[in-house]
Image: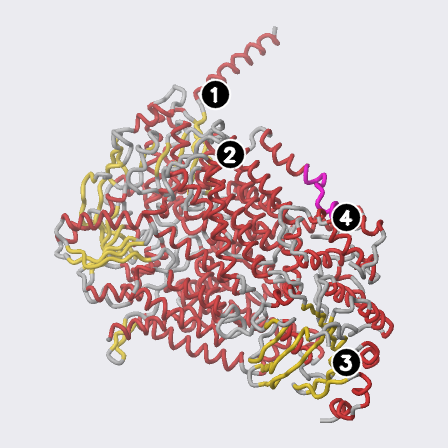
Amino acid sequence: MASILTVLFNGVAYGFLLFVMSVGLSVTLGMMNFVNLAQASFSMLGGYILVTAMQSHGLPFLVCLPIVFVLVGAVSVIVERLIFRHFYKTDDLTQVLLTIGLVFMSIAMATYFWGGSYQRFDMPSWIIGQKEIFGLTLETYRIFLVGFGAVMAVALIFGLERTQLGAMVRACVDNRRVAGACGLNTELIFAFTFAIGGGLAGLGGALSANLLGLDPNFPLRYLVYILIVVSVGGMGTITGTLIAALTLGIADVLGKYYFPQFGSFIIYLLTVAFMLWRPHGLLGRGA
Amino acid sequence: MSVMEPAPAAVSQSGHDYFATLARWKIWEILFWAALAGCYFVPEMDRMLMSRVIIWGLFAMSLDILLGYRGIPSLGHAVFFGTGAYVAGFCGKYGWSEPISALFFAMAVAAALGWLTGKLVQRVAGVGLLMVTLGLNLILFDFVLRSTDLTGGDDGLQGIVIAPVLNMFRFDIYGRTAFWYALVVSFILFIATRILVNSPFGLALIGARENPRRMITLGAPVEGDVSRAFMIAAAIAGAAGALLTQTTQTVAPPTLSFQRSADVLVILIIGGAGRLYGGFIGAIVFILLQDYLSSISPVYWYFWIGLLLVVIVSFFRKGLLPSLDALLQRFIKRKPDAPS
Amino acid sequence: MSGIILETRHMRMAFGGLVIFEGIDFALRRGERHAIIGPNGAGKTTFVNLVTGLLKPISGTIWLDGQDVTRQSPQQRVKSGLVRTFQINSLFKALNPLESVLLALLERDGRGRIAWQKVAAEKQQIDEAMALLARFGLAGDAYTLTDSLAYGKQRLLEIVLALALKPKVLLLDEPAAGLSTQQGHEVFSQLANLPGDTAILFIEHDMNLVFQYADIVSVFAAGSMVLQDSPENVRKSPRVREVYLGA
Amino acid sequence: MKTALSILTAATLATVSAQGALAQETVKIGVLQSYSGMTSLGGQQTDFAIKTFMQKYGETPGGFKLQLIRRDTTGPNPEVAKRLVGEVVTREKVQLLIGPDFTPNTLAAAPILTEAKVPSFVTGAATTGIVGEKSPYSTRTFFATPQLCKPLAPYAVKQGWTKIFVVVADFAPGHECEKFFVEALKEANGTLVGNLRTPLSNPEYSGYIQRIRDAKPDGVFIFMPLGELSIGIVRAINDSGLKASGLKIMGTGDITDEGYIDAVGEAAVGVITSGIYSTQHDSALNKEFVKSYTAVAGEKNRIGWSAVSAWDAMRLTYDALDAQKGQKFDGEKFAAFLRGHKIESPRGPITIDKSNGDIIQNVYIRRAERVNGVLQNIEIETFKDVSFK
């Protein structure tokens, strides 16, 4: 019994890990309708900023997280102003190609600045090891991940999806001219959304990189997972991304526990089945 | 026909001329293939590299049938390439070493898989389609990689023997046979595809790309056409895969990796979709540049490939071929042909 | 009479909780020129979508030429001679009118799956396409991209595409929408030239066109058919006035 | 008169320099490694090792001038590797090859190398039976899977860890390693209490960890030859508390590879691995090697097995070229010279097998520990002259 509950908890924690990794893309894709695969590179940047701040400057882990959010957010606004804004009106494939090109460039740049090998993270002692909760031995970092992810999800769903700001962003995306005429500063709103999306991606990178290992190929290695979570959840919904991340996370961990011989099949099969069943994702708005 | 007033003969004739002109071979097309064949005679030419370029061009052209003509993007096209490659590999391993018949067999198997895939996805569009094709790709890749006993897994299929083409031309290390074999097969399949896109079925594919709902109200079996398009594209992709196996006598999991699906999409978009030549142009640019960059800068060539992509989508929105075409049209200021 | 060609029996439709048709019985006779009028939201376009199979009714049946077609695909209904146009142009933007019409003709003649022969070999269909375009004054634009045609010409092409299929029943969803009065009359006078046994059902807001070209008029309002009568009687009916002005 | 003299002088000079040119025949060496993507560390280390070696021992062994031609195999991708081998052999006319890396690439290259009679060094492929059997001109300076996967089984049983759980990456090398380890475990009278094959792309291990926990083994044997997998599983076992509760973590040296042991971090401490080389190996040659390599590559780039394999390939090359001093380069003689050749390597003594060019070397059992704050693999036991079979 205890082992089933532990496995289940680990599945939830993995789900939240997938959520924090994908939510950045979910925001830009959902809010702005912009297929930004370079979010994976922003995640990597978040990881490297965490490494630099923690290892080279000796800052505490919790102080580093807001720094990562702000810095990566700032970088993504710069990239948005310089490059992305010229591509809002192009089709999905063009955006995919543009941003995958940027991913390639980011890999080479990371190799140049940080070297090709894996980075070393010395996590603070309070976050490593295990804790006893309700008779279960749970990993502290996973508990932290679940808590952090849950707070993030609630904040985003109530702060972005169901508020004036969310409505404004959608209005801008749906019709820039009308939104502009209504007195909304579309440029500012777009830049702001990008900053949030990028910052979240950076946070996701920082939270996952120390667990998964960080090297310049980080974006390519986890891009597929991010894509799967966001599209199964449905374009344009943070709630959907959360549900998809948790479902896939739990299914993956349970699958590996009960049917280890199937390996990655379970998560892929689930993806194909979901997408055939609901081509626009679980909570997608449809075309 | 009773209510039909007969059209003036001249008007009618112009219609025939229009379609005849569309399908006619242009000078530059002949030059293109002649130049490709001429590469063989250039001293110091890396013929293995050229046959690789041709094979990638053929592969990208097969995706063009789906993406350029039918408007279906696929993130799993390497499934068919890899299937063709592995079928050809199995043939060579288990004694069916005659390459041409094995090529046909590989095409047939890939076509069957393509038809099934088409059946599966014919009601799905957009992101759903991308993710389903991607998912299928990952599943097949995983299967091949893990099935060490069947496929050799990561090591690839061992013991592939390919007999000389027509019992005369052995596949040598200089790539002489490989070059001509790849070129001739690709050219024949190119001609077949060229006929296809200029046929009534080709027109129906373009119609469904432009407006599937209207095609339905014209009575066209739009969903069935998706399967048919997948089947044809898969057969040609399978042929490209088989060519790769036969010219290199190796086949390993990278032939059906997701990376390959992404690369072929990139190649097609670089060249320009819906032009039939986009795949070949894209392959020439992408593969040669990749080869060149990786030899001068083995560690950082990713950067330059990435930059190439960014530059191309920034300045040649629809790909090299259409952009250059538009430039040319403006330059010589003649009435543009209707694209089809 | 010569018999019913299209019929709906107790056809019921709803989107979620919103009931569109409570159960509609409708009949169209061979060769009839039948107009449907009614205020916005009366369910006219939904009716066409149901009959042509783009939507499926919740219950009830649809009969075409004595056959129950409720379960048939839109394509099968087209093959049986049920053809429609769209209220908002639904054309092939990157094709020219000649190619568009040829597409329709090739589908009609079952030649659309031929993949081993050039389009140029379909001489008979090309002749017919050019003739059709010439009849509607589009011959001069045969090679212009549809996207760059004037709106009026695109509207004509929308109808030509349907006519090319030689329908037994032609459903026109506001064919004159966006056209000038004169263009509207031109369209309808062309339609009047169709073979006598072709039944035409058209949704139209221009009452002049309705009263001039329809044999019979059905008035839809709020999901039901409130009146079906000759144009003269409909014109006089106080009910119709009520439907349009009242509520 | 003056003119005649100068002509004569010029002619003499020309003859001398022509002789010089003959003495200075250029030998082209193709270096085919992964320089990009997930496996780029191998290529980097190879380059550093070659550079270090040439700085130390000069660039003209046996009077031959060396010219390096580098190509990126991009990882285990036989189609690319085969084309590159064909290209450097037929167009660049290389006479020697260091690489290609990885088993599939080595297999794909073999027919070309055999046909062109080009000697090659296998510096990054471990599968058994791919050296002399496939190309008579190949020599392995890396290791063969059994050398790494067998010794830990008897070692573990000797320590009293008899119930072993085996976890391998689910691909051909993993399957091979699993086979050898399980065989050796049976021979040593140990018990296999469970085994798992985990996907190559796998960010999450907790489901697998729970299975290991359920089986209650004394030790777990791991084969994960990719950085992120090694980091992932060793950390996952550590984080789950299994290591703290006494489970012994063992594996091939991959899981504590110097290239990324820092990223594994504290979780690596105490992990027992089998390896062919550690920077901590106690010999004068190794100390010298570490010093000069670090001078070239910098502190940040730690020394892995690819570096040592490339270094030894260079040592063997120099020995063989010295033996051909004053003659024209002959590939067949080159390969023949290496058969049965014995050298002192930074890893210890190695012998190239007489019959097929494979490698015979010491295998060390090591424990990961912090030395002056840096994680190192400390050699604690030596299996001498382990065969490649």
Residue B46 visible at all: no
Residues beneath discs 4 and 2 located on the same chain: yes
User: A131 above or below B1?
Assistant: below
Residue at 58% across / 47% down in the picture?
B61
Outermost residue, right side: C182
Q: Secondary structure at mark 1?
A: helix
In this rendering, do the residues under marks 1 and 4 share a single chain?
A: no
Q: Chain of mark 4?
A: B
Relative height, residue D118 to residue C99 (above, below): above
Q: Who's the residue at 25% across and 68% down the image? A: D241
Q: Which residue is mark 3?
A: C216
Q: Amino acid at mark 3?
A: Ile
Report the residue marked by disc 2.
B178
Q: Amino acid at mark 4?
A: His
Label 3 to label 1, Cα distance in Å? 105 Å
Residue ID for mark 1: D21
- For the magenta stretch, what is the residue range? B18-30
Expressed as whole percent of the image width and height from the top left, the position of residue B109 reads 46, 48
Distance from disc 1 to disc 2, alpha carbons, whole Å, reads 37 Å
Q: Nearer the viewer, mark 3 or mark 1?
A: 3
Could you say which is closer to the camera, residue A44 or residue D113?
Answer: D113
- Classified by dominant secondary structure, the portion drawn in magenta counts as helix
Residue of label 4: B16
Q: Are marks 3 and 1 on the same chain?
A: no
Side of C121 where B91 appears, left or right: left
